[in-house]
């Protein structure tokens, strides 16, 4: 075994061992998880996907996002069947993850000691720790293992704190309390599996910003989430910009196709199959005279169309 390989293995072992000894993942570990991202990062190591892309993502359909990820080999990124606190709103943001488990005294002691070493707030429950790390644009995503009674991760007090820090909301594979109070927080939203009047007990935080499972979906810290009334989808940061432009062009294709079908210019089979040169030329001319504002810049559109067989 050569020296370079030994060094790499030692470095990776150090990263993963360091992660195992912490509540919050190190920036080095998060960078290793998101190594495909080449852009700016937040201080904790998570990819800083631009706000403009997060805004454009709001207009992407769940089906289009799912299709792009499926074609890239990401088949476990969607979860549905949520209770949505504000069902007519769409939320996008950069993911902060948290993992919860049933409580166990010896493990609780380790978590609290590690929290002390990481200078986390000793007052209150450990369920406040993920909230303390939120910054604007973050979405707090937690695996509460589907616990309802005594598994309520937040009420309206913590909900107000979450919104004050992130200007977003939460996605919990678990429950909340005081759903009525959460509904009254202007701008806050939540995707939850249930609600219960009980307080959290016999439940403990085990990690922040480590990989978690949310139902059918695998979620990494720094993923970007698209959440609407049709479900949630978690997108690797390195794929978000491509997913957005691909979905935007797909929407334009659909708009063009629907218009031409209503005009009876083409048969359905001509639009549903691979386009002929005549249809492609017509589409490009239609784009040049598009009546509204295109969702992307002209350069983005031109660059995309150069590399795609539409």
Image (cartoon, grey):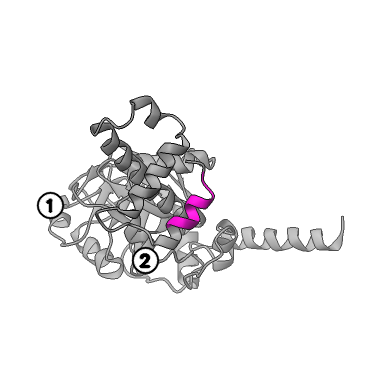
Answer few, some or many: residues within 10 Å of disc 1's Cα (few below 14, many 20 plus, some between 14 and 19). Answer: few
Q: Is residue 230 left or right of residue 187?
A: right
Let me know if residue 21 appears in the view. no
Q: Nearer the viewer, mark 1 or mark 2?
A: 2
Q: Secondary structure at mark 1?
A: helix
Q: Residue at x 26, y 30 (%)?
A: 264
Instruction: Give the residue displayed 48% in from the left and 53% down from the top.
Output: 304
Residue 196: percent from left, percent from top: 20, 45
Can residue 37 be seen at all in this image of the molecule?
yes
Image vertical order of residue 20 relative to residue 161, above or below: above
Task: Report the label total.
Answer: 2
Location of residue 65 in the rendering, given as x and y in whole percent from the top left corner: 40, 44
Q: Secondary structure at mark 2?
A: helix
* Residue placed under numbered mark 2 in the picture: 51
**Camera-nearest residue between 173 and 36:** 36
Residue at 41 percent across and 66 percent down: it is 50
Q: Which residues fall within the magenta stretch? A: 301-308
Which tag, 1 or 2, sits closer to the chain's start? 2
Residue 216 versus residue 21 in the image, above or below: above
Residue 231 position, x and y percent, is 31, 42
| Of residues 98 and 108, the one drawn nearer to the viewer in this rendering | 98
State yes or no: residue 306 in magenta.
Answer: yes
- Residue 91 in picture, x, y percent from top left: 29, 55
Q: State whether the magenta stretch is mostly helix, strand or loop.
A: helix
Q: Which residue is mark 1?
A: 180
Question: In the rendered image, which quarter contains the N terminus?
Answer: bottom right
Looking at the picture, tell me which residue is in the foreground, 191 or 113: 191
Q: As displayed, is residue 19 above or below residue 310?
A: below
Label 1 – label 2 distance at C-alpha: 30 Å
Classify mark 2: residues with Cα within 10 Å, few (<14), some (14-19) or many (20+): some
């Amino acid at each position: 075994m050569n020296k370079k390989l030994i060094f790499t293995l030692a470095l990776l072992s150090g990263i993963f061992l360091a992660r195992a000894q912490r509540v919050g993942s190190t920036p080095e570990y998060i960078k290793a998880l998101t190594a495909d991202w080449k852009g700016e990062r937040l201080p904790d190591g998570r990819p800083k996907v631009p706000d403009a892309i997060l805004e454009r993502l709001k207009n992407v359909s769940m089906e289009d996002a799912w299709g792009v990820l499926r074609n890239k080999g990401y088949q476990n990124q969607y979860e549905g069947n949520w209770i949505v606190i504000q069902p007519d709103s769409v939320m996008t943001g950069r993911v902060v993850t948290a993992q919860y488990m049933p409580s166990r005294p010896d493990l609780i002691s380790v978590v609290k000691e590690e929290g002390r070493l990481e200078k986390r707030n000793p007052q209150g429950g450990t369920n406040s720790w993920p909230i303390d790390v939120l910054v604007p644009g973050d979405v707090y995503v937690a695996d509460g293992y589907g616990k309802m009674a005594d598994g309520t991760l937040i009420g309206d007090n913590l909900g107000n704190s979450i919104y004050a820090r992130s200007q977003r909301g939460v996605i919990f594979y678990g429950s909340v309390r005081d759903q009525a109070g959460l509904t009254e927080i202007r701008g806050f939203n939540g995707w939850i599996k249930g609600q219960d009047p009980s307080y959290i007990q016999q439940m403990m935080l085990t990690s922040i910003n480590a990989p978690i499972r949310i139902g059918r979906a695998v979620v990494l810290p720094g993923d970007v989430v698209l959440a609407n009334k049709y479900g949630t989808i978690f997108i690797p940061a390195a794929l978000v910009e491509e997913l957005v432009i691909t979905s935007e062009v797909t929407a334009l294709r659909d708009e063009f196709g629907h218009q031409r079908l209503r005009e009876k210019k083409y048969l359905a089979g001509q639009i549903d199959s691979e386009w002929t040169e005549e249809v492609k030329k017509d589409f490009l001319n239609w784009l040049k005279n598009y009546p509204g504002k295109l969702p992307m810049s002209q350069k983005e559109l031109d660059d995309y169309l150069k590399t795609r067989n539409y």
